[in-house]
Amino acid sequence: MTDIELLRDRLDAVRSGIADAARQAGRDPRAITTIVVTKFHPAQLVRELHRLGVRDFGENRHQEAQTKAAELRDLDLIWHFIGQLQSKKARQVRSYARVIHSLDRASVVDALASNAVSIDCFVQLNLTDDDARGGVRDAELERLTERVLSTPGLSLLGVMAVAPVDDDPRAAFARVRAASDLVMRIAPTARFISAGMSGDYREAILEGATHLRIGTAITGNRPAAG
């Protein structure tokens, strides 16, 4: 079996799993966006996935994302920035990303302000006790949401989170769903939830996730960092 056939098989398996979970949740799988995370993988893999119909790609390191976006500018891709974002890099990320999933500080929000075309974004919620993981605490969510809403050039889609490794993912995503309900009381159109990765996307779908960030289940094991 060739590499492209293996890639197609993994992609089909994930799409089937998403459809099954969506049916279990009474949802339409077509309303769920799958973002393929290509961290450490070469641009050629993105081209192969594009040939298989993928348009949404996620990266969490600015330098790598910027390089790939430039190399692949001939393709109709939607780049999602999903990693922690430094204020000093915010405007550079804005130049190629269509969606930013990781707003977690007022300084980053302010750095993204622009009177140009709006960029879609999510506020990230931290579900752990580790501040280094990124994201705001529950108590800070409302304040940061209001900051985003008052900042020109940002269009709030909803909330994003990563389930803690050692916790029950369904319970973690239930917390995200509750956070989403809070955000929608402030911003009724911010109804989207970015949650779920290769090992827990089914649980995320059952709790209302609309954007999945899936890497190895589709791409295979990551190469070593360059």
Image (cartoon, rainbow, N blue to C red):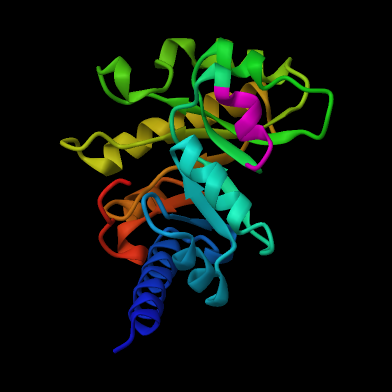
The magenta stretch is 89-97
Residue 53 picture quarter: bottom right
Residue in the foreground of this view, choosing between 14 and 73: 73
Residue 95, magenta (yes or no) = yes
Asked whether the viewer can see residue 189, the reply is no
Residue 115 picture quarter: top right
Q: Residue at x 52, y 32 (%)?
A: 159
Residue 157 picture quarter: top right
Q: Residue at x 35, y 36 (%)?
A: 162
Tell me where residue 42 appears, x and y as whole percent.
Answer: 42, 59
Tell me where residue 4 appears, x and y as whole percent.
Answer: 40, 80
Say whether residue 113 is left or right of residue 38.
right
* Above/below status of 216 relative to 152: below
Q: Residue at x 63, y 31 (%)?
A: 92
Residue 197, magenta (yes or no) = no
* Picture quarter with the N terminus: bottom left
In this view, the residue farthest toward the left is 166
Q: Residue at x 44, y 28 (%)?
A: 84
Say whether residue 31 is left or right of residue 163.
right
* Above/below status of 150 relative to 179: above
* Above/below status of 80 relative to 162: below
Tell me where residue 153 appears, x and y as whole percent.
Answer: 76, 26
**Main secondary structure type of the part rendered in magenta:** helix
Residue in the foreground of this view, choosing between 102 and 226: 226
